[in-house]
Image: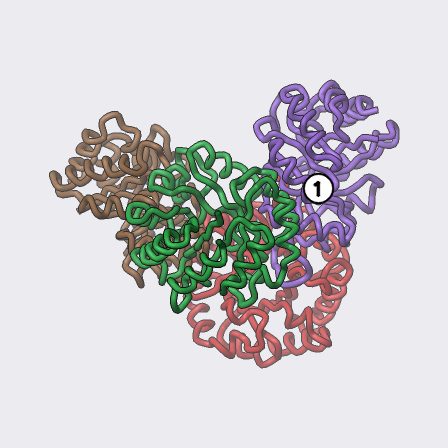
Chain colours: A brown, B green, C purple, D red
Amino acid sequence: MGIIVVNTKAYEEAIGVKALEIAKIMEKIGKEYGVEMAIAVQPTDISLIKSNTSIKVLSQHIDAIESGAYTGFISPLAVRRAGADGTLLNHSEHRMKIEEIADCIEIGKKIGLISIVCAGNLNVAKSIACLEPDYVAVEPPELIGGEISVSEAKPDVIKKAVEVVKPCKILCGAGIKKASDVEKAIGLGVDGILVASGVVKAKDREKILAEFARAMI
Amino acid sequence: MGIIVVNTKAYEEAIGVKALEIAKIMEKIGKEYGVEMAIAVQPTDISLIKSNTSIKVLSQHIDAIESGAYTGFISPLAVRRAGADGTLLNHSEHRMKIEEIADCIEIGKKIGLISIVCAGNLNVAKSIACLEPDYVAVEPPELIGGEISVSEAKPDVIKKAVEVVKPCKILCGAGIKKASDVEKAIGLGVDGILVASGVVKAKDREKILAEFARAMI
Amino acid sequence: MGIIVVNTKAYEEAIGVKALEIAKIMEKIGKEYGVEMAIAVQPTDISLIKSNTSIKVLSQHIDAIESGAYTGFISPLAVRRAGADGTLLNHSEHRMKIEEIADCIEIGKKIGLISIVCAGNLNVAKSIACLEPDYVAVEPPELIGGEISVSEAKPDVIKKAVEVVKPCKILCGAGIKKASDVEKAIGLGVDGILVASGVVKAKDREKILAEFARAMI
Amino acid sequence: MGIIVVNTKAYEEAIGVKALEIAKIMEKIGKEYGVEMAIAVQPTDISLIKSNTSIKVLSQHIDAIESGAYTGFISPLAVRRAGADGTLLNHSEHRMKIEEIADCIEIGKKIGLISIVCAGNLNVAKSIACLEPDYVAVEPPELIGGEISVSEAKPDVIKKAVEVVKPCKILCGAGIKKASDVEKAIGLGVDGILVASGVVKAKDREKILAEFARAMI
């Protein structure tokens, strides 16, 4: 079964109760089509989503810290206690040091957070897979937020990525705006999609999510 | 009226419901002695504290971003919507770029977050005061987490800092462990104290907070 | 007497012997017009420029470190021993933490490096002046590399900056392409200009430098 | 044939002409024993070493930038033009983002800089090897600068690292102080050693280098 991960970034229209609105729609569509749904929100919104929906909740980032004197960093434990099921890591808007990625994956495993680690190209995807996260998310940075989807623009990259990251699961993202983008991605062997503005900025979020979900099954 | 700010950092014993426990004690003592109380927590815990106590809630950090595509950064707006009254900035464990401090203070003013900006020495305190935050918090980094308080070890620094940051309000911190540390600080002209392990790691948090509060009035 | 500072950034046409070519032209024009010249180059090129010209040589950045185990950071001492007279700090392409700026200015004073600290707006310029560098360089980031100069687009910012940074000396930069830009800047009270592509990318570097120099006297 | 890489960090006793002194000794010993020698110096010292010795010269770091407007970053091209044969990357004192490591290796290959990328543990070593640098240098951070060498304290880590990084070449480092440390390392299958204080801070640098060299052949 495929997964749809929606990243709300720091979009005004997806913070606080507005994040919950999106999560509620995801929950509904997820049940309707039997597709797994996960939302990656601001840390402030994790508990809100967790206590009001049944979908998976992710942090958009965690810092590579254990308990202690680390003022202002995002504590993995705090994220977990707030109800998160996992976290994005190394998003193209928030690249991380390789040692920190390794540490975050390891800390996550200890406390029960799955990890979805982003990679901008094949080489980096393969390199990250060695660190054994739950998912590698392949997102060519030049396509993020654009009009052409990764599955349309770079099907070969996706195809090869599916191979090189094995046995890691794989998501693809960047520019995903319509059902055919998702269909192609699934056809290329991915386990799910990572989408942001394609859902958050959509005129009709329920409609587009339903189309994505239908394309996954 | 003075203010006591407790920074919970990423201490395991001050995350989630454990942060709320501390906030509850602060609320009680604050009312008893008529002292203003503020707790700086993990972003995940802001809404929890806000909806269950009447004390001020602060974020430990915000990033200098407005609404938009900033995955994994701490959005000032998200912090505000979750219920925060303000934020720490530039803590010695999380130093910031000068332009980012300036931007965060300005963003904070627009959306209703007060700012408490840390400085490790007099020069930096004066420099930060030019950016017009609500508070400058003077904390010599070499004393943080230690046994000797800043008001005992460096009374001259505190005294001069009170002058150079005017008309900004001023907090002092680092090594504050007992009532006499607070008394001295208040005597030197500060508007309040910033304390972390001194409360979080105290055997009897209620007792120490009561002593601090009594020393402030 | 005014100063012209040329920042060669990481432009291919201003690295190695190509940096020396520019420095040689600057030396010639500087002598001809009695204008002080300084070139801010890659650290690798400091000794080359120093041993082959008489103009001032600057690093484009130093890290806030003393002698010790700091692999891969730019040592102020190394820069000094290689022959540098000073350094840029906090360029808009390389913003620094406020504590690091303070430390670099102080380290520089101890070992004989003058400091030119960049600021993107008035507030930050004032704040940086409190740290007592040799020069504050005001460069609105949105004008850098553009066609309209700061002295044309924001004369009021320059005028006020001259006041707020006193007694620090002041440079202005961003978009400076022609003699009239320099004339205006000098008329507004600045002590010199900071220019990059305006010289490095000029078709006739000698001609433009001569025009800038003439406009300064 | 093994290689000895000496990292001079920002040690006062290894900057400028003092770096050259060390390089001269390395050159002598290298010839005497037929061991390859490389010194990783401050960028300011690259041309000095290159024009006065025949040993390999490395930068301690490069930034992931091509030609352009990148003030204050260490340009790979500048390092190359100054005479560097290669660069260290991701040293434990200067960890890098995974995408930057990937980009630096690639830029290096284009312009003729070999890359030695540091890793603190097996997982990260394997991950870095996927990026196809010339060497992976395994240095457990907790042993760097200490009295017990990595080959003594963690022979298993070295042994496994030799396997997992294949076909990349491998160096080991951290705590290497005596000939037996080098002998063990070579016995475990490494292609050379990375050493800093063990040489820079040695009472008799020539003697220790000669011992290291003898242990390698």
Above or below, comparing residue B75 to residue A207 in the picture: below
Residue at image location 39% in from the left, 39% down from the top: A140
Return the x and y of residue B165 as percentages of the image width and height.
Answer: 61, 44
* Image height of B82 relative to D174, above or below: above
Residue C54 falls in which quadrant of the image? top right
Instruction: Using residue C88 as the reference point, say whether residue A114 is left or right of it.
Output: left
**Which of the pair A1/C172 is nearer the observer?**
C172
Q: Amino acid at mark 1?
A: Val
**Residue D111 left/right relative to B3:** right
Q: Position of residue B183 (x, y in %)?
A: 54, 59
Q: x and y percent of residue C37 in the render?
A: 80, 35
Chain for numbered disc 1: C
| Residue nearer the viewer, C188 or B185 | B185
Residue sitting at 74 percent across and 69 percent down?
D25
Residue at x 46%, y 63% (from the top left corner) = B198
- From the viewer's perspective, is D40 left or right of D144? right
Q: Nearer the viewer, residue B89 or C56?
A: B89
Provide residue D118's location: percent of width, then percent of height: 52, 61
* Residue D67 visible at all: no
Mark 1 secondary-structure assignment: strand
Compare residues A105 and B136 and report the one nearer the observer.
B136
Residue at the left extreme of this rendering:
A32
Q: Which residue is mark 1?
A: C41
Label total for image: 1
* Residue A197 image-quadrant placement: top left
Vertical order, A167 against C56 (above or below): below
What crowding class fits label 1: few (fewer than 14 Cα within 10 Å), some (14-19), or many (20 or more)?
A: many
Position of the C terminus of chain A by quadrant: top left
Residue D201 seen anywhere in this rendered image of the structure: yes
